[in-house]
Amino acid sequence: MHHRFRRPLAAALCAALLLAAIPAPAAALTLTAVNDTLLPLSDSTMPARLGGEMYVPYSVFTALGVSAATEDGVLNLSAGGETLSFSPDEGYVYDQNLNSYASPAYHRNGTVYVPVKLCCGKFGFGYSTIEVAGEMVLRVTDGSAQSDSDFTAASAARIQSAINAYHGAPAERPVVQPSVPTEPPIPQVEEKPTHKPARVYLTFYGAPGAKTLAILDALRDAARQAAFFLPTDTSLWSDDLVRRIVAEGHTPALLLRETADAAPDALTASLQAANDRLALLTGVQTRIVSTPDGCDKLTAAQRDALTAAGYRLWDTTLDAGDERQTAARAYATTAQHFASTDAVIVLRLHHTQATAEAVRSLCSYMSRQGIPTALITLTTAPLNTANDIR
């Protein structure tokens, strides 16, 4: 069904040139792990870099529950109502809404390699690169795995053995154990705190994906509302989820990326383009804006242009840690911080496996402690690292 979207021959030739530029495996190997399982080390399982992005065999994602089917040379990956369709031969990728992306799949060592960042973002997985026994391991997780530090401590011997076998070295080659700090225990949640925040603004950063439905359900059940900071690249949006965010009374907001060298008018143009898409989907636009690294990283000229266009600049004051921690740890550390301050908190959350459960626990805690939440709107005085309250 994707034949009508095929790129011209030039695109295929361009993809072929890129593939030709992929280097052979270097002496410093990179291994792949799925949750707590280390994949066998071979040329067909090692990750590869293309255009600065990391790629893995698509089987990495099927091991995490993503279904895969191939039809007419098109690989379709599906999970949680989200689909990515890759044509390695013709260099295109589309989702179920026919949005296109710039990171195609490609053939390597008899299998199809797919982009890690795109697939993790679309299907709600996390990934990290960690150093173990002098080698780099790319680890893709669904939120149920142990922490990177625990995985590192448990896997050093297996990784060294896999490397020895790949090089043909004896299996009994001495293993150099890395020095790994012990992960601290999950802190106790204070149920009779002496302090509590004056109010909390709940915010969610990044493109909504497979885990967002559960997050919206958790907010609905707790009768709490939040701001969702959507990337200005609207090809990353799930249209149905954006519609539900707005329909359920949450504040749509925009997240500016790569702002360091951007001309002020380019920033406002990207925001306007995203607003045009938002208005088409929901009938509303937004003037609430944030950046990943803090609005103080914007220049004065950039901030002046944004505020002159009617935008209000927001930053978070606390990250819940749900992007890199289990739900239990994200909840406990966030609640512990709540118990240590009387200030207003702008809490950053994400769209991961751990987020919905962390939201439920935090909302329950705030209800027990009488901590109010508030909704960011255009009339709310913004909080940001630049102290710009325009």
Image (cartoon, rainbow, N blue to C red):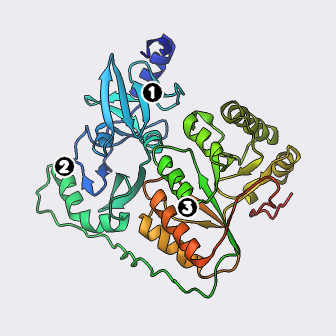
Q: Quadrant of residue 313?
A: bottom right
Foreground pick, 330 / 128:
330
- Residue 238 in view (yes/no): no
Give amino acid for label 3.
Ala
Foreground pick, 96 / 292:
96
Q: Earlier in the sequence, mark 3 or mark 2?
A: 2
Q: Which mark is residue 18?
A: 1
**The C terminus, quarter of image:** bottom right
Q: CA distance from mark 3 to mark 2?
A: 55 Å
The location of residue 301, given as percent across then percent down, is: 85, 49
In this rendering, position of residue 231 left or right of residue 59: right
- At x 33%, y 60%, the residue is 145
Q: Nearer the viewer, mark 3 or mark 2?
A: 3
Q: Residues within 10 Å of mark 1 (few under 14, many from 20)?
A: few
Contact (CB < 8 A) between labels 3 and 2?
Answer: no
For this orientation, the residue located farthest to the right is: 308
Foreground pick, 47 / 309:
309
- Residue 356 in view (yes/no): yes
Q: CA distance from mark 2 to mark 1?
A: 28 Å
The location of residue 67, given as percent across then percent down, is: 31, 35
- At x 55%, y 61%, the residue is 222
Q: CA distance from mark 3 to mark 1?
A: 49 Å
Residue that badge 3 annotates: 222
Q: Quadrant of residue 343?
A: bottom right
Position of residue 319 relative to residue 377, above or below, is: below
- At x 54%, y 65%, the residue is 320
Give amino acid for label 2.
His
Foreground pick, 332 / 220:
220
